[in-house]
Image (cartoon, grey):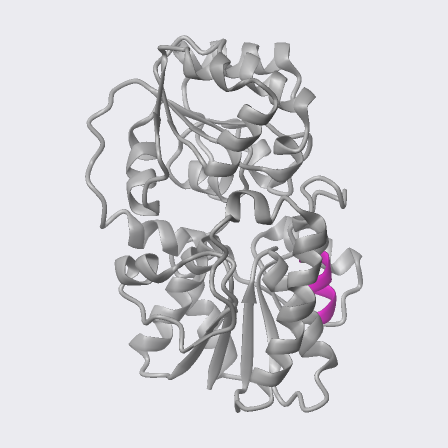
Amino acid sequence: MFTFVLGTKAELIKTVPVMKELERRNYEYLFIHTGHHDIKKMCEEFDVKEPDIVLFRSPKATSKFFLNTFKALRWSSFLSYKLLKTLSKIKSRFLLVHGDTITTAVTSITSFFCPFKNWLTCHLEAGLRSFDFLEPFPEEISRVVADNFCDILFAVSDGAEKNLKKENVKGKIVKTGNTIVDSVKLALKRGKKSKRKKFVLVNLHRNENLQSKSRMKKIVEILNSVTLPIYWPIHDQTKYALKKYNLWKNVKNNKNIEFSGLISYFQFLQEMRKCKFVITDGGSIQEESLILKKPCVILRMKTERVEGLKTGINFLTKLNVEYAKQIIERLEGKFKIPKFKNPYGDNKVSKRIIEFLVNL
């Protein structure tokens, strides 16, 4: 038996291919959802089963809830308690977690100290590092915790594998590539083709940016320097932060920007497929931009996806406004995509992961 413990949409997106590979081989799996995000619709869209066990209802005020460190820590302690009770009732050979969320860290620690543990805990997307616990926060902490408390670590790249070896982690390191390659292949079969032409796609939601007025002012200045049309499916927490710092009017009055509510993952990829380049502070989008060969302007101080910086199409701005403007000006011109090999592997990552586990 395989057991997945997931909390967010991003975790589900990257874990779906592994679930589907199990289904293809007629293996049963248990799906535990911690309730960080509401994932019911996404399960339907990806055609995977809904969670067998739901530990918490998804918070309605997600936009503010996880910006509050105290509430997040309180939720983590409750989650650990509920997980212990749940895990005591199941029999499983493998417990799989993904990525760098609160769910990932709490599950890894809880599983490690579980007195009746009779399974191997596996970390999908292991080895990514920014080498700064505050950038991004709390993701860097979560991934380091997971990599030090899990038994099997599926490294996403050569660099990730090297990071884990340097840290002398106790778990077994297995370089497989990143399941996001499989996820993108699956998702591109869905969603309607974008009708937009020659535009810039924006996605911003990083906590360390949203909690800083000075950073948000820089981001607004950078966005207002873009001359091409912008399409921005905006997160509630991002709009909340802009209003809090009296910056909302600065972007709302920009006639160059088209806002919408959040769109499905499938539609977002279709938009990315058609856009000229992406501006983001996200993590997975840096990977997706490589797969789709779309330049990516990263509005962060540091990134754990350093592989992308070596390709010549991912640009870490470190929130330097002038540098960001220079990169945007280049990308708005006749920028030629250089040739590069996807550092995250082919679209057989999930197959390699399951083959490794079933042959243990």
Residue 261: which quarter of the image?
A: top left
Nearest the eye: 250 or 101:
250
In x, y percent, where is residue 289? 43, 36
Nearest the eye: 55 or 93:
55
In x, y percent, where is residue 92? 52, 87
Residue 89 is a magenta residue: no
Magenta: main secondary structure equals helix
Is 179 rendered above or below residue 83?
Answer: above
Residue at 62% x, 17% y is 218
Nearest the eye: 253 or 43:
253
Residue 148 is a magenta residue: yes
Count of numbered marks: 0
Residue 162 seen from this side:
no
In x, y percent, where is residue 4? 49, 73
Residue 124: which quarter of the image?
A: bottom right
* 123 to the left or right of 188: right
Is 168 rendered above or below residue 207?
Answer: below
Residue 284 seen from this side:
yes
In x, y percent, where is residue 36? 52, 58
Residue at 66% x, 73% y is 80
Is 3 rendered above or below residue 267?
Answer: below
The quadrant the C terminus occupies is bottom right
Residue at 60% x, 77% y is 83
Is 48 rendered above or below residue 323?
Answer: below
Q: Identify the magenta region.
A: 143-149
Residue 183: which quarter of the image?
A: bottom left
Residue at 56% x, 83% y is 86
